[in-house]
Image (spheres, rainbow, N blue to C red):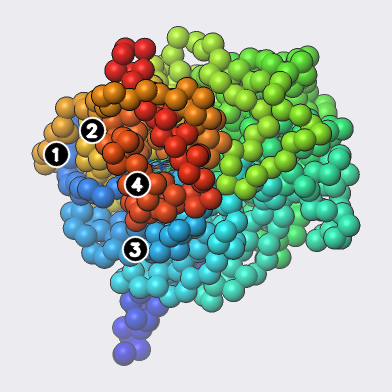
């Protein structure tokens, strides 16, 4: 290469946002991921290292947004729940779908460039597998793309071809853990945690791997293990002081399945940590205690994984109030001073503003109905709990619910308006631990380990969802869009003074970021659970979103999501990109479909077995995909309408459920179910089918 050409390349690389190697392949470093001025790409889960999901693009603004139309779409016929944030680099859009299939498409046309299938079914075939099959996204660093799989692998793929470069196991197969999260890449490392707090005696941890080689760089445990084995570090020793009883036999929990933010300015990685394993603190740490580092933000040294500081949002948690929600970095003007703040809205219903130089609490205010605590004391930094909130007497209705007042659906922050756009849930739960005994409680792997019953409580409001704009300096709601249903998608905000959000209703909407006025809407015909992104290529600003109702609400909640008629496999999952003046037609979705429960002639339900099956359906987590009361929301077939549950197909039922005949379609095996248990499950499903047909 001539000297002049090389010189020009260097100049272009310096002036442009993306560093290029001599071979023309982009090389992404922290500088590029942190660069908020780059509008061509979307390089990380929250767009930039600051996780703000704010784009400086202004082509689409409050005036022009009414001209937004479909530019292109890509149908994804084999996918089910879609919850991922796509990434965009150099005109290519990357995303993860069901069973962790990674795809690269032309970001201006949707043309499929490559597809990588990590063959999850081959890993879990014949084994038990905890958790859910959906996935929230990818990471880019150097010249590689990183993905993590349901079964616990972390993968590095080539950006241009989608070829596997390395793969490493982040936990042993056979552990009741799973990954739904996006890896976080920073400083030549890739970090991942896992879910599984409810699926056994879980002890949460995060691991950072070398981005080039896949070698383990460091691991940080979130809760202490058995003191007799020695502590991994001083932080674990400190944390152990806040636990009682034989917590290590219960696991402790804290699993970090989401919520990782790298602070490029202060050179720290922040981990949002999970709830207790089991949920019920009476069984986990019977003498009380804060139980560090549950439900906290823990700041770690990105090079070594050493503990720097922590802030705990829910000391001694007992309601599944994890702090795995996104962590957004922003410089705020508070009382005339610029504060390097961290913004966090965990499940517990309080909005936290924290000084990220040292973890000091600045403010914490309720952003939803909260009845477990009256307020957070700014002197002590601790919540002031209401008497009875810990279901001391065995039973209590608590708001928010374990789904949280805010879950993993990302909030966005607009430095122009100074507002946070926060998808909010208004639900309450009736906790009941009267059937659990402290002396006898033992966690069982691959089963539901909450040690407390939880049923829907009376609802706190006449709507269950809300999009709200929250002012983190004034500590108040600025505008609100009530939504009948919960589980609205994460948000995107732009310098065009806009906020975009997808709804459970299937509508994709744009709002005025200052007022909350609805300015544009598009009916996708299927619930949206994934957050939108934006990018600009060849002078065109695109807004792209994955449409594919998914996540815990869609999978578990039964009746609510079922009412839409988005039965399993009927409605098209797709990726849709919008642009100004674009007029492509998206084929309309089929009408709502309600699978008809099958009534078996001459079938007498064995009530005793059916009752046993009802318990198994919950404990073995069939409910996690097939829905509450065997009413499916669309993430899996409605078993009441399944011909595979009839007496004549009993051998097929057995081969599907026990042997995993459908594992390639995300139906895991349950190899240790006995014949009696299988029959009990079948009897329960039949009972539910008959009850539905009778109109109960
Ligand atoms: C991780 C999610 C998940 C869990 C947990 C799960 N299933 Fe499934 N199940 C599925 C999916 C997805 C399918 C559809 C597979 C396909 O398309 O063939 C399915 C299919 C089935 C079928 C076949 C239905 C038909 O008509 O084709 C039966 C029966 C079934 N599951 C029973 C169960 C039982 C019983 C449990 C609990 C012991 C359970 N499943 C747990 C996801 C799950």
Residue at 43% x, 60% y is 125
Circle 2 residue: 524
The first of marks 3 and 4 along the sequence is 3
Circle 1 residue: 586
Give the side of residue 452 with respect to residue 692, left or right.
Answer: right
Residue 117, labelled with which disc? 3
**Spatial distance from mark 1 to mark 4, Cα to Cα?**
42 Å
In the image, is residue 134 above or below residue 647?
Answer: below
Residue at 14% x, 39% y is 586
The first of marks 4 and 2 along the sequence is 2
Residue 94, labelled with which disc? none
The residue closer to the viewer here, 660 or 326, is 660
Mark 2 surroundings within 10 Å by alpha-carbon count, few (fewer than 14), some (14 through 19), many (20 or more): many
Q: From the Cβ of disc 3, is ligand 1 less than 8 Å away?
A: no
In the rendering, at what x and y percent does residue 186 appear? 56, 62
The first of marks 3 and 2 along the sequence is 3
In the rendering, at what x and y percent does residue 121 appear? 39, 59
**Spatial distance from mark 3 to mark 2, Cα to Cα?**
27 Å
Q: How many circles with numbers are drawn on the protein?
A: 4
In the image, is residue 589 above or below residue 310?
Answer: above
Mark 4 surroundings within 10 Å by alpha-carbon count, few (fewer than 14), some (14 through 19), many (20 or more): few
Question: In the structure shown, which secondary structural element does the residue marked by tag 3 occupy?
Answer: loop
Q: Nearer the viewer, mark 4 or mark 2?
A: 4
* Badge 2 vs badge 1, beta-carbon distance below 8 Å: yes
In the rendering, at what x and y percent does residue 450 appear? 65, 34
Q: Nearer the viewer, mark 3 or mark 1?
A: 3
The residue closer to the viewer here, 81 or 445, is 445
* Badge 3 vs badge 1, beta-carbon distance below 8 Å: no
């Amino acid at each position: 290469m001539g000297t002049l050409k090389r010189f020009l390349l260097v100049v272009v690389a310096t002036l442009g946002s993306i560093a290029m190697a001599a071979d023309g392949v982009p090389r992404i470093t922290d500088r590029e991921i942190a660069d908020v001025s780059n509008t061509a790409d979307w390089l990380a889960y929250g767009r930039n290292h600051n996780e703000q999901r704010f784009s400086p693009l202004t082509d689409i603004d409050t005036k022009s947004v009414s001209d937004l139309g479909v530019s292109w779409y890509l149908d994804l016929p084999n996918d089910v729940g879609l919850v991922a944030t796509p990434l965009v680099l150099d005109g290519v859009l990357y995303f993860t779908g069901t069973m962790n299939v990674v795809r690269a498409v032309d970001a201006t046309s949707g043309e499929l460039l490559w597809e990588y299938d990590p063959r999850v079914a081959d890993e879990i075939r014949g084994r038990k597998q905890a958790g859910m099959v959906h996935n929230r996204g990818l990471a880019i660093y150097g010249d590689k793309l990183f993905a993590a799989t349901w079964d616990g692998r972390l993968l590095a793929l080539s950006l241009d071809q989608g070829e596997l470069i390395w793969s490493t196991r982040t936990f042993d197969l056979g552990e009741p853990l799973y990954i739904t999260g996006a890896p976080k890449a920073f400083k030549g490392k890739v970090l991942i945690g896992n879910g599984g707090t409810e699926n056994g005696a879980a002890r949460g941890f995060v691991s950072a791997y070398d981005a080039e080689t896949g070698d383990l760089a460091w691991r940080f445990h979130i809760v202490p293990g058995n003191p007799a084995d020695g502590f991994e570090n001083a932080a674990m020793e400190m944390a152990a002081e806040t636990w009682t009883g034989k917590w290590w036999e219960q696991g402790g929990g804290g699993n970090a399945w989401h919520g990782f933010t790298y602070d490029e300015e202060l050179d720290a990685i922040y981990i949002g940590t999970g709830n207790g394993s089991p949920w019920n603190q009476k069984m986990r740490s019977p003498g009380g205690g804060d139980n560090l580092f549950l439900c906290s933000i823990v700041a770690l040294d990105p090079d070594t994984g050493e503990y720097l500081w922590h802030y705990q949002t829910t000391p001694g948690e007992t309601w599944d109030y994890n702090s795995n929600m996104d962590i957004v970095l922003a410089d705020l003007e508070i009382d005339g001073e610029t504060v390097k703040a961290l913004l966090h809205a965990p499940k517990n219903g309080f909005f936290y503003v924290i000084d990220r130089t040292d973890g000091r609490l600045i403010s914490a205010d309720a952003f939803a109905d909260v009845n477990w605590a009256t307020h957070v004391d700014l002197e002590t930094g601790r919540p002031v709990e209401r008497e009875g909130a810990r279901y001391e007497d065995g039973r209590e209705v608590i708001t928010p619910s374990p789904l949280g007042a805010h879950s993993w659906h990302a909030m966005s922050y607009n430095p122009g308006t100074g507002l946070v756009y926060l998808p909010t849930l208004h639900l309450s739960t009736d906790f009941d631990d009267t059937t659990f005994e402290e002396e006898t409680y033992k966690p069982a792997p691959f089963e539901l380990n909450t040690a407390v019953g939880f049923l829907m409580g009376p609802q706190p409001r006449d709507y269950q969802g809300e999009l709200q704009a929250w002012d983190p300096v004034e500590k108040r709601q600025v505008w609100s869009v009530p939504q009948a249903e919960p589980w609205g998608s994460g948000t995107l905000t732009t310098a065009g003074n806009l906020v975009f959000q997808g709804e459970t209703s299937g509508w994709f909407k744009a709002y005025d970021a200052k007022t909350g006025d609805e300015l544009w809407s598009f009916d996708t015909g299927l619930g949206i659970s994934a957050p939108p992104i934006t990018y600009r290529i060849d002078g065109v600003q695109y807004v792209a979103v994955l449409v594919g109702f998914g996540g815990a609400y869609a999978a578990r909640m039964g009746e609510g999501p079922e009412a839409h008629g988005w039965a399993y496999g009927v409605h098209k999952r797709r990726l849709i990109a919008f642009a100004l003046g674009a007029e492509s037609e998206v084929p309309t979705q089929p009408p709502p479909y309600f699978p008809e429960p099958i009534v078996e002639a001459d079938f007498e339900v064995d009530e005793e077995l059916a009752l046993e099956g009802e318990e198994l359906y919950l404990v073995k987590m069939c409910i996690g995909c097939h829905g509450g009361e065997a009413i499916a929301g669309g993430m899996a077939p409605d078993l009441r309408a399944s011909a595979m549950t009839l007496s004549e197909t009993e051998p097929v039922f057995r081969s599907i459920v026990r042997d995993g005949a459908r594992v390639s379609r995300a139906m895991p095996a349950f190899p240790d179910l006995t014949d009696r248990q299988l029959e009990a499950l079948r009897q329960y499903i039949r009972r539910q089918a008959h009850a539905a047909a009778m109109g109960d």
